[in-house]
Image: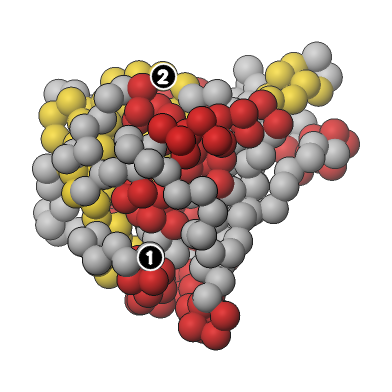
């Protein structure tokens, strides 16, 4: 069953990605108020599938390189144009733009980090930081050693502007292609991906090689026993476990909204935690 057809037939309620400023509900302490406030949203659905080309989750799915077509969403030009528009909008009216997969995608990972007792001093890398929204949330939850990277110059400028507006001046944002980081990214306790691997998988130019480079770059960036949190709407749990089977240990799947169709259960979004092992 084609994923797009399943979505259309089921009319699954998928709210749009959150846009706006970060003026709502500042957390106190170790993000406890923030997590309590948004904890219940998971039960209501709440993941934006903007930019997704394949999000079925059935027994027939396997780790295939050819199960969906490439897209402009996988090109550098698309993201540079997108973030240039969002940068212009932010400068005009202070709107940060879209939060990829919506706010729940961030709160889901934050809840896991809280339960896993990730220390506030942990070195955290946001892979493909976009507008820096996740960096803001991480900083508001008390995490102090934060780095965001993106290959889009407009994204980097936008993220820096957003962080500055939030008076978060100690967060590092770098213009860098994760696939060609040349060993500059090392020693991270946690790496977070919210849609970047999806975009790489959609790149029309040598997508198979891009996915291999991604896995190697991730291995290089993480410390031994460091964690990798990935949110994807293009890959199923089984496919992601196969893709990151070498050099990583599967830890857990984070709960995401599910649906039933034709007697089978599926998810619009996969959210998994891996640990770096040798």
Secondary structure of the residue carrying tag 1 is loop
Q: How is the image coloured?
A: secondary structure
| Residue 152: assigned label | none
- Image quadrant containing the N terminus: top right
Q: Nearer the viewer, residue 41 or 199?
A: 41
Do the residues bearing badges 2 and 1 touch, measured as CB atoms within 8 Å?
no
Give above or below for 159 relative to 117: below
Residue 3 higher or lower than 21, as above or below: above
**Location of residue 67 (image quadrant):** top right
N-terminal label among 2 and 1: 1
Comparing labels 2 and 1, the label whose residue is closer to the camera: 1
Q: Which mark is on residue 166?
A: 1
Task: Name the spot of residue 76 as percent of width and height, x first.
Answer: 44, 70
Q: Tell me if residue 210 can be seen.
A: no
**Which residue is disc 2 drawn over?**
252
Q: Residue at x 12, y 54 (%)?
A: 183
Q: Is residue 217 above or below residue 85?
A: above
Looking at the rendered structure, the number of numbered marks drawn on it comes to: 2
- Apparent side of residue 97 relative to residue 167 in the rendered image (left or right): right
**Kind of element beneath mark 2:** strand
Image quadrant containing the C terminus: top left
| Label 2 crowd bin: few (<14), some (14–19), many (20+), radius 10 Å | few
Residue 270, image x and y in percent? 54, 32
In this view, the residue in front, 89 or 149, is: 89
Q: Is residue 168 left or right of residue 104?
A: left
Q: Residue at x 72, y 47 (%)?
A: 15
């Amino acid at each position: 069953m084609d994923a797009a057809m399943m979505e259309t037939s089921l009319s699954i309620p998928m709210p749009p990605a959150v846009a706006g400023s970060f003026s709502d509900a500042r957390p106190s302490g170790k993000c406890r108020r923030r997590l309590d406030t948004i904890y219940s949203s998971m039960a209501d659905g709440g993941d934006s599938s903007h930019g997704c080309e394949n999000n079925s989750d059935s027994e027939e799915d396997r780790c295939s390189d050819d199960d969906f077509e490439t897209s402009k969403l996988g090109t550098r030009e698309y993201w540079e144009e997108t973030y240039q528009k969002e940068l212009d909008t932010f400068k005009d009216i202070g709107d940060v733009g879209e939060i990829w997969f919506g706010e729940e995608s961030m709160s889901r990972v934050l809840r896991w980090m809280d339960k896993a007792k990730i220390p506030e001093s942990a070195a955290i890398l946001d892979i493909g930081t976009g507008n820096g929204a996740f960096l803001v949330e991480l900083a508001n939850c008390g995490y102090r050693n934060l780095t965001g990277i993106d290959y889009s110059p407009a994204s980097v400028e936008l993220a820096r502007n957003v962080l500055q507006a939030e008076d978060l001046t100690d967060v590092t944002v770098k213009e860098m292609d994760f696939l060609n980081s040349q060993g500059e990214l090392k020693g991270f306790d946690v790496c977070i991906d919210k849609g970047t691997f999806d975009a790489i998988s959609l790149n029309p130019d040598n997508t198979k090689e891009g996915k291999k480079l991604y896995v190697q770059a991730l291995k290089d960036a993480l410390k031994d026993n460091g964690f990798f949190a990935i949110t994807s709407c293009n890959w199923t749990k089984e496919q992601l476990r196969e893709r990151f089977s070498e050099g990583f240990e599967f830890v857990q799947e984070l709960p995401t909204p599910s649906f039933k169709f034709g007697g089978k259960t599926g998810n619009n979004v996969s959210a998994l935690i891996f640990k770096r092992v040798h």
